[in-house]
Amino acid sequence: MHPMEQSSPRASTYLAEGAAHGEAASKTSADHAGNALSPGGPSPKMRARNLTVRYGPIVAVTDVSLDVPARQVLALIGPSGCGKSTFLRSLNRMNDTVPGAVVSGDVELDGQSICGTEIDPVLVRKRVGMVFQRASPFPTSIFENVAYTVRVAAHRGQRDVADRVEHALRQAELWNEVKDRLKESGTSLSGGQQQRLCIARALAVEPEVLLMDEPTSALDPIATAKIEELVSELRKGLTIVIVTHSMQQAARISHRTGFFNMGSLIEVGDTTTMFTRPREHQTEDYISGRFG
Amino acid sequence: MTAVVSGTPRFTISPRRKVVNKAMLGLCVAAATFAVAVLMWIFGYVIVQGARYVNIDFFTNLPAPVGEAGGGFLNALVGTGIMVGMASAVSIPVGVLAGIYLAEFGRSWMAQVVRFINDTLNATPSIVAGLFAYTLVVLQVHRFSAIAGSVALAVLMIPTITRTAEEMIRLVPRTLRDAALALGIPEWRMTLQIVLPAAASGIVTGIMLAIARVSGETAALLFTAFNNRFLSFALDQPMSSVPVQVFTYAIAPYDDWHHQAWAGSLVLVSLVALFSAAMRIATRNRHRMRA
């Protein structure tokens, strides 16, 4: 029972499960072949350079450099407290809201730095949206949850708000379930529907990048499957970075996977490669379930 | 361990636990009953003493001269309405804004100082607030006035509203703020349009407590608004209020006036209760957040 001997077969089971999961997953594997980010390829949508994040004396992320390829899904995996969520939050300046957080290094969006005091985080967040682990509908109606976002963040006039709301809800695959109850409270929806409402709200801003911080970890398998299908649909027009605790999920929906441990990026690469032939021991140990 | 070894495992509740459980539950029920009983006693007594004398005249007439029947509390009811209204108009915005400041920027030393002073003010006896308004307004213009009374009431209301607003805004989960900010919603809009509505029903409760408290305030009005036996809308003149009139009538030697004082007490308690209930229903949050 040497761990190394058993790890490879187990790692590949994730992919097998993923492929069996359905259409979405088979597309993923098909896409993989040509989409490896190679030097000299298309320039990345976002790029982190030597990023270090400290919360007071604690260093949460240490010197991470990572490219986020355009119109692909990048999954970030790793044990709890490994810094992957903190890293994600620095991609749209959400660490600004954490008292005592200090970010050094640089993050670029389309080649432009988004760090620094002269950059307005509000403008960054309009282009780089975010969905969290816990769905947090605003305490208003389903319609108003999206409409408010359209009016405030997307600066739309009153006239096409209803159309924009419908469009966003359709994009989030929620429209058919809520079209007859738009005036009901957003919190009256089920957990999975609430999460899709939050995704609809984020899409209404028309972001270029969508960050997802464990969007399905509070959901049951059926709701999770719906969100995963949604991600596979959205990645056609959107760059997505998703933090997940589920390695099966990473295998099912992502093109590339990054493995974090103890605040460092241990390894990043093509998802298939990561789950079958990881370069690093730590990665192999983690995906084979030896720790984490 | 001995129990496991010595015999078959038992799943029955031990007699001692049963007794302790009953005793503790009994104590809790007794304490709750006592608290409610005192309240009911007061309320019941006020009803018994006052209900007979609450009639149309009470609401529509001015005080009658001693010995004449049919006088009412119209001047006092109007006066309380005006002064509590003016005090609310000042203290609600100030209190809510101060609460936002403390909740959102509460870490600075400045906020710590504000919070400490606010808590001290909250525990200040109302007569001190009255003295403050007396020095600030009455002594300057050499006249008791409705404005002076309103100032005293506002001083009493602001700390209560500030404290509740801060607590309620703090209760709004961080996830909701993060969700709003991550959509590219500016912080000021997040605070005013997302966080404040989410905290609204709690803040309204605090405002109601403050209004209920000052509606029955006597000490702060005795030497600020003083009293007025006539219906007055002049803000720079002495003005009557229900509690001060109840006080005046209660210590007078006439039976008529005693009856009216009871009626005034009953009306005051009922109005505050009705107003609170109405406000709670009107601002009930249909879109409750998950706990």
Image (cartoon, rainbow, N blue to C red):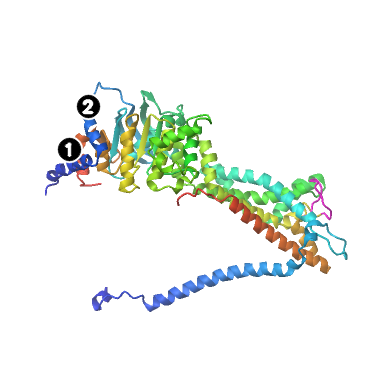
Looking at the rendered structure, the kind of residue marked 2 is Gly
Q: Position of residue A11 (x, y in %)?
A: 18, 42
Magenta residues (range): B228-240
B153 sits left or right of A172 in the view = right
Q: Residue at x 52, y 30 (%)?
A: A159
| Residue under numbered circle 2 | A34
Circle 1 crowding by C-alpha within 10 Å: few under 14, some 14–19, many from 20? some
Circle 2 crowding by C-alpha within 10 Å: few under 14, some 14–19, many from 20? few
Q: Quadrant of the N terminus of chain B?
A: bottom left
Tag of residue B44: none
Q: Earlier in the sequence, mark 1 or mark 2?
A: 2
Q: Position of residue B133 (x, y in %)?
A: 73, 49
Pick the front one: A47 or A54 = A47
Q: Quadrant of residue A211?
A: top left
B239 sits left or right of A174 in the view = right
Q: Position of residue B170 (x, y in %)?
A: 51, 47
Q: Residue at x 34, y 47 (%)?
A: A219
Label 1 – label 2 distance at C-alpha? 17 Å
Q: Look at the image and tell me whether residue A99 can be seen.
A: no
Of circles 1 and 2, the one toward us is 2
Query: Magenta stretch: residue B173 in it?
Result: no
Q: Look at the image and tell me whether residue B90 can be seen.
A: yes
Q: Residue at x 34, y 45 (%)?
A: A223
Looking at the rendered structure, the kind of residue marked 1 is Thr
| Residue under numbered circle 1 | A276
Q: Quadrant of residue B128?
A: bottom right
B27 sits left or right of A104 in the view = right
